[in-house]
Amino acid sequence: MKKLIFVSAILCMSLLTVAQTPFDALRFSMLGFGGTARSMGAAGAFGALGADFSTLSTNPAGIGLYRASELTFSPSLHYANAYATYNGMGREDEKFNLNIANAGIVFAMGSDDNTQSKWKRVQFGFGMNRLANFHNNVIIEGDNLHTSIVNEYQEMADGIHPEDLNRFNTWLAWDTYLLADTVRDPNGRLRYTSAVPSGGVGQSKYIETTGAINEMVLTFGGNYDDRLYIGGTVGFPTLNFREDATYREVDIEDSIPGFRSLAVEDYVHTTGSGINFKLGIIARPTDWVRIGAAVHSPTFFNLRDAYGRTMRHTVTSNGASNTYVTNSPRGSFDYTLRTPLRANVNLGVLIRQYGFIGIDYEFVDYSDARFRARGDNFSEVNHDIRSTYKGASNIRVGGELNLNPFRLRAGYALYGSPYKDNLNDFEKRSLAFGMGFRDQNYFMDFAFVMTSYDEDYFMYSPHLVNAAFIENHITSVIMTLGFRF
């Protein structure tokens, strides 16, 4: 068993009355490779190869390799499957999402016949690449013979007068009679009793997440003597994330006096936008080798959370049942998030007319993410980010076989775990395949990407409940239509 695993952002919201947690910073900083089907079919290993719209979000110098103007559009089907095991019981759920992975246009100006300057061409591009997809459904279910979520509310409420309880958690438990009464311990400290004193409940949690990070890009680049390519991108990411979660407990064997069931229904909706800057360079020392590097500034997000909670407690008495329902206030909070700086180096090898091999290496220090808000420096949460996360290496390797006019592609990507001391796994592995048809004036590409990662998840305080182990498998199918002019 790992030493400590992240707690649900929603349950941490109970303690903070807002939803910012270290895992939120990780969720919005841990990007994948996205964009066109050609790039994704080679696992995103296009940093040094260029002439693909995806590189505007990875190594913008790739725009310098365009010799003709181009328009691309990429619809995508996202399928997420999650299998959760909790206390010996397994449950599976899935979610489909149809989205736009990429849409963009690049204008290439200049020609190879330019003899007055070694600047052969300049390029300008704008459009959108999808960098993260949050769509997923998870069901966790199992029996717990020892504790209840009410035990967590007891710990949070002890020593606090009922009128001063937190309106997003302990007050709801008190108002629905889950915290049943108050007593004084021998030291005179106020204590609360629980409607579920010692477990014996069936527990379940259903979690639905939706949303994405889409980055609008504005990129300029140039080609110097067909040997040096430079580019810069101003990125405008938009973030939309929503999580709806319902936690339930039921009396397994009708052995808890007066108690039948409880439910805690949560939602949090995060929206906002940001800005970042990317600079890249690609050198072509020989006709068959390209070497690239790029640096991405942190993304500076302005975000807003909207959140709320409903608590239900169904009791039985003399054969009749009654349900107590209480709602929290509707909360909202404005804040900023600075994601980590990113840096990558790239190698591309062109094998004459037969195809290419690309290798990308990226480094991201996830411990460098920071929250800020007016009147709140988030010192405790930012300290937890530094102590929980670390720098991680991401590697993408892919290639293309040219069977003119058809192309076959394959690739593999490994995104390293962001957690220190093996606190959790979260290492992401992607296997990609692709194919395409390319003509002088148009092209069509397809990609199939399978991504998997594991995580441990606590439904409430880790010292009170065992972790659920979740196996995530995500399949993406992308098609790109492109036109040159």
Image: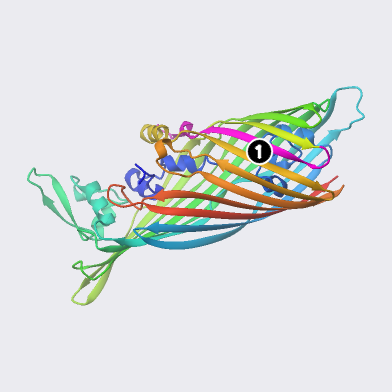
| Residue that carries the numbered disc 1 in the rendered image | 57
| Colour pattern | rainbow
- Residue at left 92%, top 24%? 115
Nearer to the camera, 181 or 251: 251
Residue 321 at x, y = what percent?
Answer: 25, 73
Query: Within 10 angstroms of label 1, few (less than 14), some, or many (20 or more) residues?
Result: many
**Split into 4 quadrants, where in the image is the C terminus?**
top right
Q: Give the x, y percent position of residue 127.
A: 70, 43
The magenta region covers: 352-377
Extreme bottom residue here?
Answer: 319
Q: Quadrant of residue 31?
A: top right
Left or right? Give the position of 261 relative to 366.
left
Is residue 255 rendered magenta in the image? Answer: no
* Left or right position of 299 against 18: right
Q: Is residue 440 left or right of residue 476?
A: right
Q: Is residue 331 left or right of residue 99?
A: left
Q: Foreground: 29 or 397?
A: 397
